[in-house]
Image: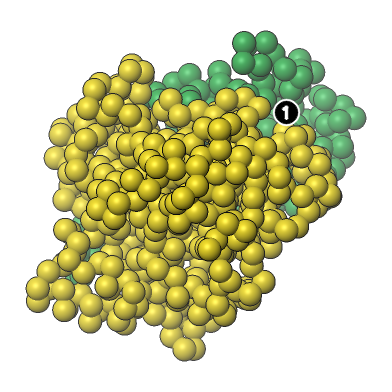
Chain colours: A yellow, B green
Amino acid sequence: MNTLFDKIWDAHVVQRVPDGPTQLYIDRLYCHEVTSPQAFAGMRARGLKCLRPQQIICMPDHNTPTHDQDKPIEDPVSRHQVDTLAQNAADFGLTHFGMMHPNNGIIHVVGPEQGLSLPGMTIVCGDSHTSTHGAMGAVSFGIGTSEVEQVLASQCILQSKPKSMRISVNGALRPGVTAKDVALYIMSKITTSGATGYFVEYAGSAVQSLSMEGRLTLCNLSIEMGARGGFVAPDETTFEYIKGRPYAPQGAEWEKAVAHWRTLRSGDDAVFDREETFDAADIEPMITYGTNPGMGIGISQTIPHPQNASDEKALAYMQFSAGQRLVGTPVDYVFLGACTNGRIEDFRAFASIAKGRQKAAGVTAWLVPGSWKVLEQIKAEGLDVVLQEAGFEIRQPGCSACLAMNDDKIPAGKLAVSTSNRNFEGRQGPGARTCLASPLMAAAAAVTGVITDPRDLLS
Amino acid sequence: MKQKFDIIKSTCVPLPLENVDTDQIIPARFLKATDKEGFGENLFRDWRYEADGTPKDFVLNNPAYSGEILVAGKNFGCGSSREHAAWAIAGYGFRVVVSSFFADIHKQNELNNFVLPVVVSEDFLAELFKSIEADAKTLVTVDVPAQTITNEATGRSESFELNGYKKYCLMNALDDIDFLLENKDKIEQWEAEH
């Protein structure tokens, strides 16, 4: 009761269906090319137009290659899907940031950086990592394609209200510990389904001290603990980040908006359905050893003994053993990017370790910015030069090797240290083995060729 | 996809693994279609086939098991929101998925595609896996009007949750858009007030 989640959700209730779900008004719908074509086809079959086209933003990101984006996509099936989105956006009168458009990138990177995702909003997209936008102080969650069609048609969605949960992380994070480690740590404690059925508010001094990039990473991973979404109440850090962004309110509208946003916080008397509290000092750099994101350990720890057939299957797939430490394990691939860690701060972190060192000879490294704007900032800060001198190449933006729908596939049996969000079997390519970690851990692996505690390389 | 639900009595296909994610149900490389057809052929593709298409030792390749009901370990459908997973399950011919726990988005995707997710207790699930292991021809009855599921081998029955709205939709083959379009005046009223 009286949580920020209640306030935002309740303010968007159009009606409560008797013995059924809530009809919830949606402020912002994002569409990408993979989960929208069947929704647009459904609209055509019913002869419908979008109710509120100005609230819908489209961009391709999953299929886009990370090189030669000025040329047509080579894979004809990928090209068709990307072209279909462009055609659908044109036919239904929707804003579309196509490939090579200066605003293109991964939806969950672009929305916040353009000021399209704002505090107090309800935001949906046919993508489970829509939870990312919760960092802006919004109720933001992933939906299926049938639900995308609902929003296209009615700007509403039928949805049962999730329960509320507060996860507090108190104290100061230790050096070398990032938002990614915080999320992997929470998951390792509550499991990959520990927050299923809940909407999470992240709180506590460690969360409040995170930058917006850090909060976006933390909220991004809410779905990996099963939560429908996660958010951080907006504060001065949020307002500072949003101010002046292209689609953010300007002038008098800005002052009015901020005044409203300041009211967006859980009441002192708020009652959550569940509370979890963690101590920031207990968190060390994390890495996953299994085939779901909850199967993670601190870098100094050993792989725990399997509890059931599913755990055994995971260890067999990863070719790891219980009791093993991961430090020193040879690494074949390193991936920096994705909606989880494809922002400027992630490239700064990676570069801080790469600077003055060289990429290990046996490692293939893919560094993929989350958007053209991120790439622009990388260049403005000279990080491209630092990375090039260390033997790294920066690619063009997109989802890339996070789910390998383009050509960026990790070959079967190869081990990747990846800043993405899922280590599921075959996620980064059939047979690929994925260890999830922070950009610092990824950089440490890239320059040493083995899994390495990044704190050993921090100056 | 739209089909009316009543009483389904069928043998089952058992998948006693936990945390089955939607990347396993349908791998990302099969998500490039722009329609909903053909996903059933690639259901559990990488557990079902080698890279060269040779069938693996997997339950869908075992002729002993068949039926309209998939029985899976807890936290079924976690991970990606891809509705293609529900299209693959429906396309293969399953009408019911039984588990002790479903991931939220996938559960909703199943319902929106007229596949019924039936949540049972851990005990019921464990006993059902045992029944199927003892006899692959074990029948299960899912009675949607009564909201009960029965393991016919043991006679054990449980009721399952299904809200009245969705039950009406399933039994009458109606979807959410039909409902929303009928309520356009309420949407405009909400917008006028905010």
Q: Which secondary structure, mark 1?
A: strand
Residue to which mark 1 is pinned: B13
Q: Quadrant of residue A321?
A: top right
Would residue A251 appear left or right of A81 to someone viewing this image?
A: left
Q: Is residue A25 left or right of residue A303?
A: left
Residue A101 versus residue A352 in the image, above or below: above
Q: Is residue A304 above or below residue A198?
A: above
Q: Where does residue A366 sit, x and y in percent of width and height?
A: 45, 37
Residue situated furthest bottom in the rendering = A268
Q: Residues within 10 Å of mark 1 (few under 14, many from 20)?
A: many
Q: Is residue A10 visible?
A: no
- Residue drawn 14% across and 40% down? A93
Residue B187: give x, y in percent of width and height: 24, 58
Determine the residue positioned at 41% across, 28% down: A406
Q: Is residue A437 left or right of residue A328?
A: left
Q: Nearer the viewer, residue A88 or A364?
A: A364
